Image (tube, rainbow, N blue to C red):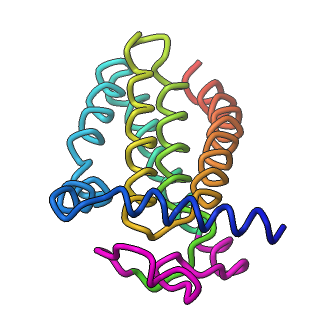
């Protein structure tokens, strides 16, 4: 396990050091959830357009619950594992270009978990309505990479977050379909 942790540290140092001062504002913007608001508004619009206000409103409510659950779930894991973020890890922080300095714990990435969870769930909701909805997967990939670029997460944090997000989205969709069937058929 120590070898895996060391490789994880080496990868984040390598990826972080590929960055430049010129690109830092771009990646700081990417990592800010607020800047993704147009994507969220587009998703809400597509849901209502595809399913109408009543059923679409229910789906939007379910999406809000998804984000709240994902946020609390990742905080529970982070506070249980308590892995330091790369920018706070005394072994490597002097090797990183630090342009963002969060103090919370690292494992697992909330950005990777929630963005993957949200995106996969949206795909499952809308795949029969919009053939290009799969492009939404670009968001969690870019969003997750921003965390590596900024040196605030390790690759394992991101990888586990993506896997957990994908898994939760499929489980959540399974239960959503049961509720949707009872309420709207």
Relative height, residue 67 to residue 57 (above, below): below
Residue 128, image x and y in percent?
A: 49, 11
**Quarter of the image holding residue 154?**
bottom right
The answer, for residue 108, to whether it is visible in the render is yes
Residue at point 50%, 82% (across, down): 104
Residue 81, image x and y in percent?
A: 72, 77
**Quarter of the image holding residue 149?**
bottom left
**Quarter of the image holding residue 79?**
bottom right
Residue at the bottom extreme, as displayed = 90
Q: Which residues are magenta?
A: 75-101
Which quarter shows the N terminus?
Answer: bottom right
Residue at point 46%, 44% (across, down): 63
Residue at point 55%, 23% (across, down): 184
Residue 55, image x and y in percent?
A: 43, 28
Q: Is residue 41 magenta?
A: no
Q: Give whichever of 133, 90 is nearer the camera.
A: 90
Relative height, residue 1 to residue 159 (above, below): below
């Amino acid at each position: 396990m120590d070898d895996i942790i060391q490789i994880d540290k080496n990868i984040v140092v390598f990826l972080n050091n590929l960055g430049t001062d010129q690109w830092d504002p771009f990646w700081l913007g990417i990592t800010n959830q607020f800047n993704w608001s147009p994507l969220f508004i587009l998703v809400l619009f597509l849901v209502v357009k595809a399913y109408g206000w009543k059923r679409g409103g229910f789906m939007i409510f379910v999406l809000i619950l998804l984000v709240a659950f994902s946020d609390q779930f990742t905080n529970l894991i982070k506070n249980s594992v308590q892995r330091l973020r790369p920018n706070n890890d005394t072994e490597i922080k002097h090797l990183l270009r630090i342009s963002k300095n969060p103090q919370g714990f690292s494992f697992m990435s909330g950005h990777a978990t929630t963005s993957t969870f949200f995106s996969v769930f949206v795909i499952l909701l809308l795949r029969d309505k919009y053939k290009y909805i799969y492009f939404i997967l670009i968001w969690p990939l870019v969003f997750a990479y921003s965390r590596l670029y900024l040196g605030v997460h390790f690759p394992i944090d991101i990888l586990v977050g993506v896997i957990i997000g994908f898994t939760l989205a499929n489980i959540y969709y399974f239960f959503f379909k049961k509720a949707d069937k009872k309420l709207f058929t």
